[in-house]
């Protein structure tokens, strides 16, 4: 019973803390999960004129990775108390065409990390609202709000190694698998 999961990181930077959280999730994920990392770096700014000439290849690839996934995992930073533009832009592309988008009835789970104290709560709330508008099925909880993330990494390898955080991630992944099966 293989499970195909598409992972989206809301940050493009190489040393992203959120990408490290995704890496930790990948290590914790059960054997039967096949995680595919979506690449947002080549996705242009949404423009209906561009779209009317056909999706750019980066967008086609992004949509396809969501279409074939059993579930989509978003791990994102918070920018100015909200969703990073890079992520919103990618989701806007994926939301088209409105009546047959790959997001409709797709199970999602959201997590986020920040060196700050708020744990990306406001960003995640906006992602949730965006996905609701797109008729995706976003898991209500458990919530992963990782604050002071820079203090939770191994200073040499950069890997997330905070025991309590790893335990939370484990229950989050278990809950997400159950969430996906509600709709299968
Ligand atoms: C931030 N950062 C930030 N952090 C936060 O907790 N709340 C916020 O509102 C903001 N706002 C914000 C705006 C902009 C434009 C930037 C560039 C950054 C800090 C942010 O959490 C930090 O840069 C993280 O390291 C970004 O995530 P990655 O790239 O490490 O995954």
Image (cartoon, rainbow, N blue to C red):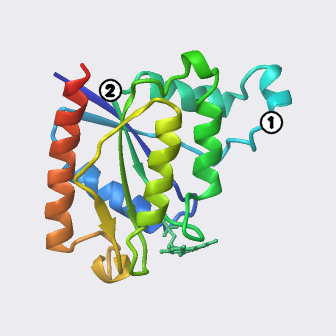
User: On the rendering, which quadrant does ligand 1 occupy?
Assistant: bottom right
Q: Position of residue 61 (x, y in %)?
A: 58, 28
Q: Is residue 176 left or right of residue 36?
A: left
Q: Nearer the viewer, residue 143 or 13?
A: 143
Q: Alpha carbon of mark 1 to alpha carbon of mark 2: how far? A: 28 Å
Residue at (46, 24) in percent of width and height: 104
Q: Quadrant of the N terminus?
A: top left
Give the residue pinned by disc 2.
70
Q: Ligand 1 within 8 A of label 1's CB?
A: no
User: Residue 33: percent from the left, percent from the top?
Assistant: 23, 35
Left or right, residue 3 beside residue 130: left
- Does 88 sit above or below residue 69? below
Crowd rating for badge 2 (residues with CA inside 10 Å; few <14, some 14–19, many 20+): many
Percent position of residue 2, x then y: 21, 25
Does residue 68 sit above or below 180 in this rendering? above
Earlier along the polypeptide chain: callout 1 or callout 2?
Answer: 1
The residue identified by callout 1 is: 47
* 15 vs 110, nearest the viewer: 110
Q: Residue at x 44, y 56 (%)?
A: 125
Q: Give coordinates of residue 128: x percent, y percent.
A: 44, 47
Residue nearest the observer in this picture, 51 or 163: 51
The structure residue drawn at horizontal position 49% and vertical position 61%, both measured from the top left corner, is: 123
Quadrant in which the C terminus is drawn: top left
Q: Which mark is residue 180?
A: none
Task: Answer with the quarter of the image where residue 81 lies.
Answer: bottom right
* Vertical relation: 168 (above or below) 31: below
């Amino acid at each position: 019973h293989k499970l195909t999961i598409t992972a989206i990181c809301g940050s493009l930077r190489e040393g992203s803390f959120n990408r490290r959280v995704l890496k930790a999730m990948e290590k914790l994920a059960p054997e039967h999960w096949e995680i595919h990392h979506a690449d947002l770096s080549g996705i242009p700014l949404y423009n209906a004129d561009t779209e009317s000439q056909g999706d750019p290849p980066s967008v086609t690839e992004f949509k396809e990775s969501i279409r074939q996934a059993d579930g989509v995992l978003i791990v994102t930073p918070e920018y100015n108390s909200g969703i990073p533009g890079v992520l919103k832009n990618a989701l806007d592309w994926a939301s088209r065409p409105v009546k047959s988008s790959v997001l409709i009835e797709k199970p999602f789970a959201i997590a986020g990390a920040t060196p700050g104290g708020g744990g990306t709560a406001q960003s995640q709330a906006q992602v949730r609202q965006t996905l609701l508008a797109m008729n995706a099925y976003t898991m209500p909880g458990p919530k992963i709000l990782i604050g002071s993330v820079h203090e939770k990494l191994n200073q040499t390898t950069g890997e997330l190694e905070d025991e309590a955080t790893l335990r939370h991630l484990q229950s989050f992944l278990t809950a997400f698998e159950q969430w996906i099966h509600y709709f299968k």
